[in-house]
Amino acid sequence: MSTNQQTDRSRNQGGAAFLLAQLGAHAARAFAERIASLDLTPPQAGLLRMLAATPGRSQRRLAEDLGMPPSRFVPFADELEGRGLIERRKNPDDRRSHALYLTERGVELLAELREVGAAHERDVCAALSSDEHRQLTVLLRRVAEQQGLTPGVHPGYRSS
Amino acid sequence: MSTNQQTDRSRNQGGAAFLLAQLGAHAARAFAERIASLDLTPPQAGLLRMLAATPGRSQRRLAEDLGMPPSRFVPFADELEGRGLIERRKNPDDRRSHALYLTERGVELLAELREVGAAHERDVCAALSSDEHRQLTVLLRRVAEQQGLTPGVHPGYRSS
DNA sequence: TATTGTTATACTCTATAACTATA
DNA sequence: TATAGTTATAGAGTATAACAATA
């Protein structure tokens, strides 16, 4: 209420929240284009990373973390299994559930994925010195934590 | 190539590009929830702002800036016109095209929208001091400019 | 002949809910 | 009876392309 309309207007559209949304969409799109060279979509890349971090989880839990209904997870996992990147193993303790794991080929592809991710990081932050790059990361991490976001996971990835 | 795998992994998932995508999706979703109280979706809010900035443009140009095909723009504009927020006027010079304008009610709603946007900005950046907030904005603006993003517009808004 | 707005159609995507098997 | 995975179906949302009016 202390500033005039003109100022408020430029604040909203040039403010940090708007820039975050704009840059976030841009970064997500650019990342999707990059990993298309590996024949991967962002949710597929997300699953590979999740399986590397915590192998052997059930489809239901993985589906929940990816923000998709279990029914949609089935054909989603089918394709990656068909490409030999992941495998379903019967859980001997509870034979209703499938435990999911990366295959050897999945591990190899994940390594390539990480290289692509590093290149993406460099390109997105090309405008910044390495000192500013660190500054930005620290600030973003603080904001993310305060906003209650889980490190390493975000369901906002586009499905296409 | 200079760092080991462990380091690369944490870099990718905790790096600035990933945080941008994660926080961007979060900020966009939070903003969408906020403006739902005004019965607006993000693309609708975008159109109101575009009409305030440059009134009288044709549907085709507006559709292009919003990243939607002209055919989809029709029902999109229909609803806002039905609610009395925008109006189509025949362009006397070229009677094929419609020039779009905000109505008085549209201007009023836009004022409320700006208040909501300011509150959104405060909440998203609640973790930062006002000095850090400024720092973050400057860094983001530099990155956005270097990445070739147009100030004030982003087509990444969800359609829902 | 080209362009603006519009309408119609066809298609993709997605979620809901029914189904099978294990518990 | 409840839960994991799966399958089937139906609905929403979208783009492509045909159409009418104007240039």
Image (cartoon, coloured by chain):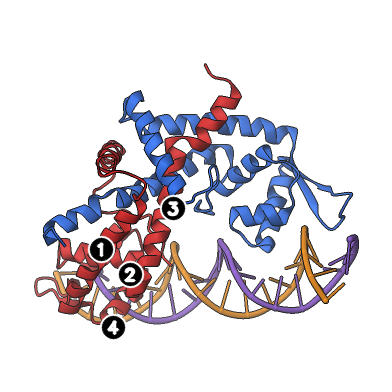
Chain colours: A blue, B red, C purple, D orange
Whether residue A71 is visible? yes
Label 3: state its secondary structure: helix
CB of mark 3 within 8 Å of CB of mark 4?
no
* Tag of residue B25: 3
* Front disc: 1 or 3: 3
Q: Is residue B96 above or below residue A159?
A: below
* Front disc: 2 or 3: 3
Label 2: state its secondary structure: helix
* Front disc: 4 or 2: 4
Label 4: state its secondary structure: helix
Of mark 2 and mark 3, the one earlier in the sequence is 3
Of mark 4 and mark 2, the one earlier in the sequence is 2
- Residue type at tag 4: Gly
- Residue type at tag 3: Ala
Q: Is residue B103 above or below residue A133?
A: below
* Tag of residue B73: 2
Q: Name which residue lies at 14% across and 68% down.
A: B56
Which of the pair B47/A63 is nearer the observer? A63
- The residue labelled by disc 1 is B62
